[in-house]
Amino acid sequence: MDAASEALIGRYLRHLAIELGRSPHTIAAYRRDLGVYATWTAADGIESLPAVTRSDLDRYGIALAEGAATGAPLSPTTVGRMLSAVRGLHRFALDEGSLGEDVTRDVRPPKPAARLPKALTIDQVAALLDAAGGEEPSRMRDRALLELLYATGARVSEIVGLDLDDWTQSDEVIRLTGKGSKQRIVPVGSIARAAVDEYLVRVRPGFAARGRGTPALFLGERGARLSRQHAFLIIRAAGDRARLAVEHLSPHVLRHSFATHLLQGGADVRVVQELLGHASVATTQIYTKVTADSLRDAYLLAHPRAR
């Protein structure tokens, strides 16, 4: 691009930093993304920002996706981010009077491919939970934590955020606080409830004596609230002991497994939506694709005339 367009990019970056208060990390990302845009337009023979057309932007999006603009193909998420930087630049130039029209107005990033959640089988979950257990205090806590994660389908932040007051001996449900501070009621099965009760009686008092009186339900060995990072380490250690050949094992895998197993068992998708705390049933319906794939595979294997 010409010097005027390069100067415009510089003014836009200063606008982001000074007037909008964007972080240095964000500014650096915008500078990189717009640098790719400037290099590609120059290589394509586009000499200035006002010369860019809508068709040019379409070709740029394709070039990003296929790797022609960066040397390697980019994911839909990354392409969307880079096009967002370009749209911001063009809107700024229009507001400044450097452009007569915003050709990026109707440009939309490519829709990311739906990524199916990874779920464990019921047998794998059983092996994982068994491997988490033991007579050591930390193992009893770990078993209670993972049992509760699988029993409720809760996010790990929701579980480690629980306080003692959130757990009652009499009720068979628990109140979880999810995204946007929205609360929901989720049933807790007898096995998970027994594991948590045992932890509360036999383990938590000892851990709490080492700390400063935190109300947290789940504590670390030093008496502080268990962290999300610690929960990740707990499930990965249990997975190693169970010898599960599962990549990226995390507490969220238990949430995926919870939803998938409920749907496989015949639960209504809207019930699962409520249990997971999804704002839209469309988010939950991705799990129906998982179960549909499982049904198809079982059908192909079992039916004598399926192939």
Image: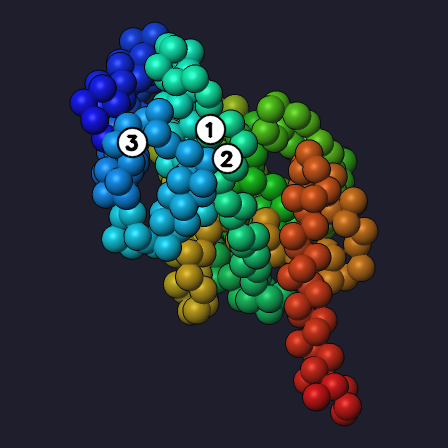
- Residue under pointer 3: 34
On the picture, is 54 further left or further right than 165? left
Q: State the SS at label 1.
A: loop
Circle 1: residue type = Val
Q: What whole-number distance in Å separates the C-alpha atoms at marks 1 and 2?
A: 8 Å
Residue 186 showing in the rendered view: no
- Residue under pointer 2: 107
Residue at image point 56% right, 62% down: 120
Residue at image point 59% right, 29% down: 179
Q: Quadrant of the N terminus?
A: top left
Q: State the SS at label 2.
A: loop
Residue 62 percent location from the top left of the image: 41, 49
In this rendering, the label closer to the viewer, 1 or 2: 1
Residue 265 percent location from the top left of the image: 77, 61
Circle 3: residue type = Leu
On the picture, is 49 further left or further right than 103? left
Marked residue nearer the N-terminal end (3 or 1): 3
Q: In this view, does 14 lie above or below 264?
A: above
Residue 141 percent location from the top left of the image: 49, 45
- Within 10 angstroms of label 2, few (less than 14), some, or many (20 or more) residues? some
Residue at image point 73% right, 79% down: 299
Q: What whole-number distance in Å separates the C-alpha atoms at marks 3 and 1?
A: 16 Å
- Residue under pointer 1: 103
Q: What whole-number distance in Å separates the C-alpha atoms at marks 3 and 2?
A: 16 Å
Q: In this view, does 112 lie above or below 171?
A: below
